[in-house]
C-alpha cells in the first residue's frame, strides 16, 4: 500500500489483483446488480488511490479499511437511489424494485435467493454479506460496520431468520425431497 | 444505530444445526456474476490518473514557490530603490513648519538655551 502511494504501479497492480474480486462480490451482494457493483468497486479503488500516500500501517487493518469504504459507498448508493431498506421494514413488505436483474442468474433458484437478500434491511444484508459471503469473522465485520460484536451477532441472527422465512418454500428442493412440479410451484 | 442483542434474537430454531446448514447451502447457491473484463484495467487506469494529477499538482506547487521567491526578491529590490530615490530627492529640501508643530520647535530651542545657560553658569561659578 505504501509502495502504491509512492507511485509504484506494480504494487497497485498487486492490490488490484488481490482485492478486486472480493470487493466486487461484496458490492454485488449489497447492490444486487453488476453495473452498480462495478461502479462501487471503482469508487472504492479511487478513494484508495487518493489516500494511498497517507496510509499508515499502524492504523486499521488494510482489508478492514477497504471493506469499510466499499460498504459505505454501497449504503450511500442505496440511499441515493431510494433503495435503502430500514431496519424496521419487514422484508415481506419491501419494495420489490431492488431485486436483482434476472439475466445474471443461471436459474430461478439463484434469482430467488438474490431477491430474498435484496429485500433484507440494509444492515442485516451487510452483516450477512460480510460474515457469510465474504467469510469475515464477526470481529472483523464489527470493525467494518463500526458496531459491537454483539450487535453484529444480533443483525446476523435476524438476517438469517428473515432469509429462512423467505426461502422456506425452496428448502425441500435443496434437501432433495421435492418433485420437479413442486419446485416449479415453489418458485 | 447500534443494536443490542436480546434473548429473542436467536430462537431455538435459529440454532438448529440442520436449519443452519440448509440456509448456508441455499446462500452458497447464489453466485456472483463475473465482473466485466475491463474492470481491473479501469482500476489501474484510475491509479495512473491519480498519480499523474498528483505529480502535476506537486510540480505546480514547486513552480508557485519558485515564482513566489522571485516575486518577493523583486518586491524587496523595488522598495529599496524607491527608498533610495525618496531619500535623494528630499535630502536638501526644507519644509515650513505647520502652526501645530511650532510648539515642538520652541520647546527644542528652549532646551538648547537651557544647556547654554547652564554652561555659562558653570563658567561664572568658576570665576
Image (cartoon, rainbow, N blue to C red):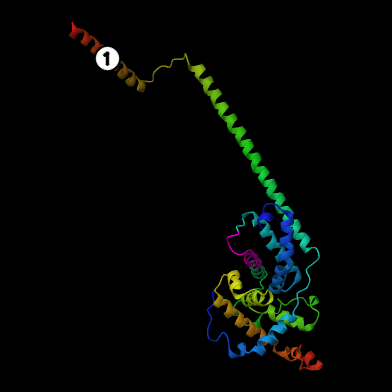
- Closer to us: B96 or A98: A98
Q: Which of the pair A163/B13 is nearer the observer?
A: B13
Quadrant housing the C terminus of chain A: bottom right
**Residue B121 coordinates in the image, percent (x, y):** 21, 10
| Image quadrant assignment for residue A64 | bottom right
Residue at 69% from the left image edge and 83% from the top image edge: B24
| Residue A110 drawn above or below residue B76 | below
Q: Is residue B37 left or right of residue A36?
A: right
Q: The N terminus of chain A lies in which quarter of the figure? A: bottom right
Taking the spot 75% from the left edge, 81% from the top edge, the residue there is: B29
Provide the secondary structure element on which disc 1 rests. helix
Where residue B71 sits: x, y (%)? 61, 33
- Height in image: B99 above or below A40? above
Provide the chain ID for the residue under circle 1.
B
Is A58 inside the magenta-drawn segment?
yes
Left or right position of B65 against B127 = right
The quadrant in which residue A94 appears is bottom right
Depth check: give the residue in front, A140 or A91: A140
Magenta residue span: A57-70
Residue drawn at point x = 36 percent, y = 22 percent: B101
Tell me which secondary structure the magenta stretch mostly adopts.
helix
Residue extending farthest to the top is B127
Q: Which residue is disc 1 drawn over?
A: B115
User: Which residue lies at the image location 69% right of the left edge and 61% below the top edge?
Assistant: A45
- Relative vertical location of residue A119 with respect to residue A170 in this rendering, above or below: above
Taking the image as drawn, is residue A39 in sight? no
* Coordinates of residue B26 in the picture (x, y in percent): 72, 84
Amino acid at each position: 500500500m505504501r509502495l502504491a502511494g509512492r507511485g509504484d504501479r506494480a504494487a497497485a497492480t498487486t492490490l488490484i489483483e488481490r482485492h478486486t474480486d472480493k470487493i466486487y462480490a461484496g458490492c454485488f451482494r449489497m447492490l444486487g446488480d453488476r453495473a452498480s457493483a462495478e461502479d462501487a468497486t471503482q469508487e472504492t479503488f479511487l478513494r484508495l488511490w487518493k489516500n494511498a500516500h497517507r496510509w499508515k500501517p499502524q492504523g486499521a487493518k488494510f482489508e478492514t479499511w477497504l471493506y469499510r469504504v466499499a460498504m459505505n459507498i454501497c449504503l450511500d448508493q442505496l440511499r441515493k437511489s431510494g433503495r435503502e431498506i430500514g431496519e424496521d421494514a419487514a422484508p415481506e413488505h419491501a419494495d420489490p424494485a431492488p431485486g436483482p436483474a434476472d439475466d445474471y442468474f443461471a436459474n430461478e433458484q439463484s434469482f430467488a435467493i438474490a431477491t430474498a437478500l435484496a429485500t433484507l434491511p440494509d444492515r442485516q444484508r451487510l452483516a450477512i454479506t460480510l460474515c457469510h459471503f465474504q467469510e469475515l469473522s464477526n470481529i472483523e465485520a464489527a470493525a467494518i460496520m463500526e458496531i459491537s460484536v454483539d450487535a453484529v451477532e444480533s443483525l446476523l441472527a435476524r438476517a438469517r431468520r428473515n432469509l429462512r422465512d423467505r426461502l422456506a418454500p425452496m428448502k425441500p428442493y435443496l434437501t432433495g425431497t421435492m418433485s420437479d412440479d413442486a419446485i416449479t410451484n415453489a418458485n | 444505530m447500534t443494536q443490542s442483542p436480546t434473548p429473542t434474537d436467536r430462537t431455538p430454531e435459529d440454532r438448529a444445526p440442520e436449519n443452519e446448514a440448509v440456509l448456508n447451502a441455499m446462500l452458497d447457491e447464489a453466485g456472483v456474476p463475473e465482473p466485466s473484463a475491463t474492470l481491473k484495467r479501469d482500476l489501474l487506469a484510475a491509479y495512473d490518473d491519480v498519480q499523474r494529477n498528483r505529480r502535476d499538482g506537486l510540480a505546480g506547487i514547486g513552480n508557485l514557490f519558485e515564482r513566489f521567491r522571485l516575486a518577493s526578491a523583486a518586491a524587496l529590490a523595488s522598495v529599496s530603490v524607491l527608498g533610495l530615490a525618496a531619500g535623494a530627492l528630499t535630502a536638501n529640501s526644507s519644509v515650513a513648519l505647520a502652526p501645530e508643530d511650532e510648539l515642538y520647535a520652541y520647546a527644542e530651542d528652549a532646551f538648547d538655551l537651557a544647556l547654554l545657560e547652564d554652561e555659562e553658569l558653570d563658567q561664572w561659578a568658576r570665576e
